[in-house]
Image: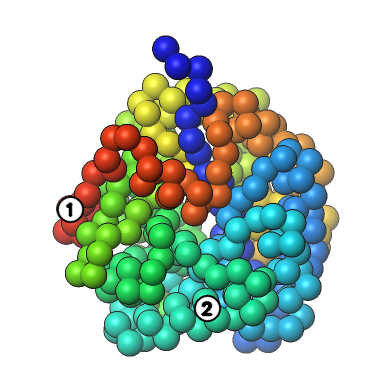
Amino acid sequence: MSNRKPLASLSLDLDNQWSYMKTHGDEGWETFPTYLPLLIPRVLDLLDEQRLRITFFIVGQDAALQKNHAALRMITDRGHDVGNHSFRHEPWLHLYSEDELDSEIASAEKHIELATGQRTNCFRGPGFSLSRTVLKVLAQRGYVCDASTFPTFMGPLARMYYFMTSKLSKEELEQRDQLFGKMQDGLRPLKPYRLQTEVGDLMEIPVTTMPWFKIPIHVSYLLYLSVYSPWIAMLYFRIALFMCRITGVQLSLLLHPLDFMGCDDNIPEMSFFPAMNLPVERKLKFMRKIFQLLNKNFTMLTMEEHAKALRQQPKPVPLRTPAAISLP
């Protein structure tokens, strides 16, 4: 048996304060309040400490604002990759026309490259929003991979929680009716695959959930469990890693900004998010344990590196159609 560690990737959706407020229906998001100058150095220091390189999925609107440029440039200056997380961070990309999508993705590309010095080659839709048209536009624009699928049955429950804590109008609720996905998304594959489009194929790297059970294992969920018992949260994660290894699932773990922020950062608008009652140091201590387990069990890559490695492996990655994974 080979002792070679399996491949895995780590990414962070760099949703800013205003984008959470916008999706949540909170007033004041139009002024684009930001915590990126506080957050990004904190995340980068921890990643440096653990010798990890990851992909930051950046929202184009943040890259378009001068007040965020110094923080965003730190990402690539310190050796990390950047991905495209749309321009306006609207979790209803599946409602956009092809022209609207091309403009949305192109605008984000342009501003992210101006701010960071790096072109984006990977995409993740806000709220895991995806459609056949999104895939077509990405393929036309030369993207290497998409990372917008979240194979879990629990998307509607997460959406219900989000709506219960929101101030959204009926029209806004209808726009967000696929936020975090549908029940049938739990039937989607966990292992990476190629998605066929009219103009070529894209590597799809799903956000990993627990093999067989399809329940979340991303870090925000683990931190939520840790509020009740850090020991149970870590045991849960260890079981998930073990199941990924025995089932041959190449882990792709998702991070969020609020995984690195806490109640002592004094951002009351974010108090609705799970585990925001924890102090920063407790979260960072937990994150160190997560990162140490990842380094111990996997060869950690950025999303683009992971996609390219999948293309080069001896056994071809399966090719699937959008219809096969129930894409609109």
Instruction: Inspect the image, locate mark 1, and give the three-letter code of the amino acid beneath it.
Output: Ala
Asked whether the viewer can see residue 191, the reply is yes
Q: Residue at x 72, y 46 (%)?
A: 47
Which mark, residue 108? 2
**In the foreground, 256 or 25:** 256
The answer to whether 22 appears left or right of 155 in the picture is right
Which image quarter holds the C terminus? Answer: bottom left
Asked whether the viewer can see residue 174, the reply is no
Helix, strand or loop status at disc 1:
helix
Where residue 271 appears, as percent x and y from the top left, is 68, 60
The answer to whether 247 appears left or right of 230 in the picture is left
Q: Residue at x 50, y 38 (%)?
A: 8
Relative height, residue 98 to residue 154 (above, below)? below
> Residue farthest to the top?
1
**In the foreground, 195 or 277:** 195
The number of numbered discs placed on residues in the rendered structure image is 2
Where residue 151 appears, as percent x and y from the top left, is 35, 47
Earlier-in-chain disc, 1 versus 2: 2
Q: Quadrant of residue 224?
A: top right
